[in-house]
Amino acid sequence: MAWTRYQLFLAGLMLVTGSINTLSAKWADNFVAQGCGGSKEHSFQHPFLQAVGMFLGEFSCLAAFFLLRCRAARHPDASVDPQQPFNPLLFLPPALCDMTGTSIMYVGDLLIIMAQIIVSIQMVLEEKFVYRHNVHPLRAVGTEGLFGFVILSLLLVPMYYVPAGSFSGNPRGTLEDALDAFCQVGRQPLIALALLGNISSIAFFNFAGISVTKELSATTRMVLDSLRTVVIWALSLALGWEAFHPLQILGFLILLMGTALYNGLHRPLLTRLARGRPPAEEGEHERLLGGSRTPINDAS
């Protein structure tokens, strides 16, 4: 089935804003600045605080939704209000998945597989609720952002005291040190610019992602989400943020092959190969399948 222009726009928006979101987070991680209390310069490693910022960006979609709803009061628009009422707590489970998966992906590479499994559960839950209740994408993203922002903001308090050992990226060695993060932002204003890019891009990225789930499917959304890693990888190499490893080429080839198979790009090739069969072989094939033969009972 051919994609409409709107679906292509959503796919492009998801790829561009998703790439900006990850690159801005990488940019923030590359900064080095002093923390609180005159501590030595250290990298900006604050995964959970960055996740709070992302949920703040998602939460802003809820404000956009209610602005559209006020506009719809004067100019009715069926796409704004859901056809069926729903309990906002339905989006608490996908919000928890989003919070856990995002936080884990910020902490270490070995945990990314676990994070991807959690994100996949999130996508399936979102698809189920969005289809069943016809929820507007802005409302879905905003509701998840509200839950994630409130829960993770409260968790920052105990994280300030929980020792994390080698997993910690702050001088105190705790799971998260939000005060140290704010001190680093104050001493290096470009970190604030990177965080602002991260917060603003996540709003558009998740809106496009939910819209793709509603228009197409959660599987298509995951395929598009995996494609943006190619853009991120290429730009990270160009900026010197990552080192090149030959094995990465093989990984991206497998990724592109899977994407091509999922989108049915192999079907024209198979059709062309079938049409390229020699004529003698085609005739034999037709005779085996049963061509025009005289029935046995009519032989007499």
Image (tube, rainbow, N blue to C red):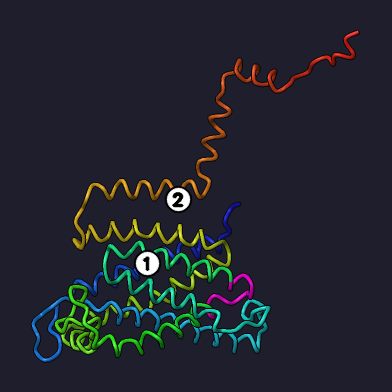
As for residue 273 lying within the magenta part, the answer is: no
Expressed as whole percent of the image width and height from the top left, the position of residue 207 reads 48, 73
Label 1 crowd bin: few (<14), some (14–19), many (20+), radius 10 Å: many
- Residue nearest the observer in this picture, 266 or 68: 266
2 or 1: tag closer to the N-terminus: 1
Task: From the viewer's perspective, tell me whether residue 82 is left or right of residue 185.
Answer: right
Expressed as whole percent of the image width and height from the top left, the position of residue 166 reads 18, 73
The quarter of the displayed image where residue 14 is located = bottom left
Expressed as whole percent of the image width and height from the top left, the position of residue 32 reads 14, 76
Return the residue at label 2: 259
The stretch of residues the image draws in magenta is 129-139
Return the residue at label 1: 115
Which residue appears at 42% of the width and 68% of the height?
118
As for residue 135 lying within the magenta part, the answer is: yes
- Residue nearest the observer in this picture, 296 or 53: 296
Task: From the viewer's perspective, tell me whether residue 134 is left or right of residue 222.
Answer: right
On the rendered image, what quadrant is the C terminus found in? top right
- Residue nearest the observer in this picture, 122 or 287: 122
**Given the image, on which type of amino acid does mark 1 rest?**
Ala
Q: What is the CA distance from the residue labelled 2 to the residue labelled 1?
A: 21 Å
Task: From the viewer's perspective, tell me whether residue 93 is left or right of residue 178.
Answer: right
| SS for callout 2 | helix
Expressed as whole percent of the image width and height from the top left, the position of residue 71 reads 60, 87
Q: How many marks?
A: 2
Residue farthest top in this picture: 300
Task: From the viewer's perspective, tell me whether residue 198 is left or right of residue 125.
Answer: left
Which residue appears at 34% of the width and 69% of the height?
20
